[in-house]
Amino acid sequence: MAQSTPIYDDSTFFKNYLDLPRQQHGLDGAPEWPILRSMVGPVQGDKVLDLGCGLGWFSRWAVDNGARHVDALDVSRNMIEKAKEMTPTGMQSTTINYQVKDLEEGLSLEAASYNVIYSSLTFHYLETTTFTRLLGLFHAALKPGGRLVFSVEHPIYTAPTCDTFISVDLPSGQKEESIWPLNRYGYEGLRQTRWLGGHIRKHHRTLTTHVQGLLDAGFVISGVREYMASEEDLAKEPRWKGALERPIFLLIKADKSKSI
Amino acid sequence: MAQSTPIYDDSTFFKNYLDLPRQQHGLDGAPEWPILRSMVGPVQGDKVLDLGCGLGWFSRWAVDNGARHVDALDVSRNMIEKAKEMTPTGMQSTTINYQVKDLEEGLSLEAASYNVIYSSLTFHYLETTTFTRLLGLFHAALKPGGRLVFSVEHPIYTAPTCDTFISVDLPSGQKEESIWPLNRYGYEGLRQTRWLGGHIRKHHRTLTTHVQGLLDAGFVISGVREYMASEEDLAKEPRWKGALERPIFLLIKADKSKSI
């Protein structure tokens, strides 16, 4: 079973999770969403797969924007139940197929059936062997010309022993308040941390592993972006200033060639 | 004039530079070379452009491996003179055209004329506007199916205020000896540091800017690698262990489509 299951189905953690701005306000509460939206592009008539759909915000956005069908998967039963509650009845039965599904346990997808495969902040919970295997599966499951768009915690964010900013007196004598204590970048694998009062297990992978995995699976890389807080983001949420000191999110768009 | 000129033409700095393993031992002294070599691939019959050629190690490797012609450019007169000295007379007059050239000052290249454009650890000396403009020029100067292969100092390496490892007592109470004090990642631009007894001016750019610049210029990304020290590298050079704590080099291969 995926290691992220217990935590998302823990009631205290889940309550804290629901209080996050991106759960309260949906996609507009996620500062990286405008980049992802531009990577996804128009979805009119598309068949969409949403992996780690959470409360279903993206799935409903896709339907609102003309997607023909969405398969929305999440490992957490809590999450899927809540997503169903939040989905208008007509929309759910006709176009969004919510399913509790553990990506670590094997997923089978019909070949050349999706226009869009989307995943927000989910893949860093997967072991690298699973991640790499899934990329091959996604490539096969996309129609020619289809796209995979996903975000993960940035490798700079997942790497270090200590994942909080620290205040440091630099050798120069200068005092810096927001130093990200980077280490262990080249050592891929399990990282354990605390978040929202729960114990989190995630997997650190380098940029190299992400990009080479996509290329090896046959994808064409068409976007690699790091979320950087804009002036407008900072006016709304001063806490995103940290993203300018070290990136938090890595966003990737990868296409299946039209000529395959 | 490029800001790196004075430093490479400073006699003390240049003497120290010549003592570096990668200058003493050529390509085999550079641990990232095997990755770059695999990105470059066979060069038999190719016309090659080597930007920031330094002592000409790569240019001579290309000729030794069957390249038809190499244009080898460097901003430093010292470097070009030394490169010429190190080049067998026959090779130089027939196949390697060494030129002192400042990439910041405008470069003109014949359209669709090169099979390979190569650059090792040079582009981080260029301002981003120059770098971006050059990518367009390189795309135009490559033959269809040609490739651009380059290395730069990794954005993680160029970003911070302090570019040395520090020892830190983490909030957990754990003491870590090799913390890379990352900050300022999102703030692109000039960085000044000291290296080999000289003052160095270089330009920090995010991963996003590198990759999007290539995509915007029309390139197909076919390799993105971070040098990570192997067991074998560490046996030869224990000091490369630092590269596992935070990457030093970013290596990219970008292709011009065959169908253009």
Image (cartoon, coloured by chain):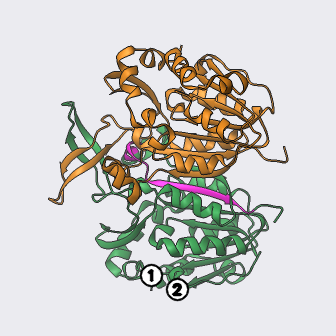
Chain colours: A green, B orange
**Number of the label disc, if any, that sits on residue B141:** none
Quadrant position of the C terminus of chain B in the picture = top right
Q: Tell me the chain of label 1.
A: A
Amino acid type indicated by mark 1: Ala
Q: Badge 1 is on which residue?
A: A2
- Mark 1–mark 2 distance (CA, rounded to whole Å): 7 Å
Q: Position of residue B250 (x, y in %)?
A: 50, 45
**Number of the label disc, if any, that sits on residue A105:** 2
Q: Position of residue A182 (x, y in %)?
A: 32, 51
Q: Quadrant of residue A163?
A: bottom left
Lateral position of residue B49 relative to residue A129, left or right: right
Q: Quadrant of residue A16?
A: bottom left
Residue neighbourhood size for the residue with mark 2, other residues' Cα within 10 Å, grouped as few (<14), some (14–19), many (≥20): few
Magenta stretch: includes residue A247 = yes
Q: Tell me the chain of label 2.
A: A
Q: Residue at x 54, y 20 (%)?
A: B85
Lateral position of residue A238 relative to residue B59, left or right: left
Q: Residue at x 59, y 74 (%)?
A: A134
Q: Name the secondary structure under disc 2.
A: helix
Magenta stretch: includes residue B46 = no
Which residues fall within the magenta stretch? A241-256
Q: Residue at x 61, y 77 (%)?
A: A72
User: Pointers 1 and 2 in contact (CB under 8 A)?
Assistant: yes
Q: Residue at x 18, y 60 (%)?
A: B172
Label 1 or label 2, whichever comes before in sequence order:
1
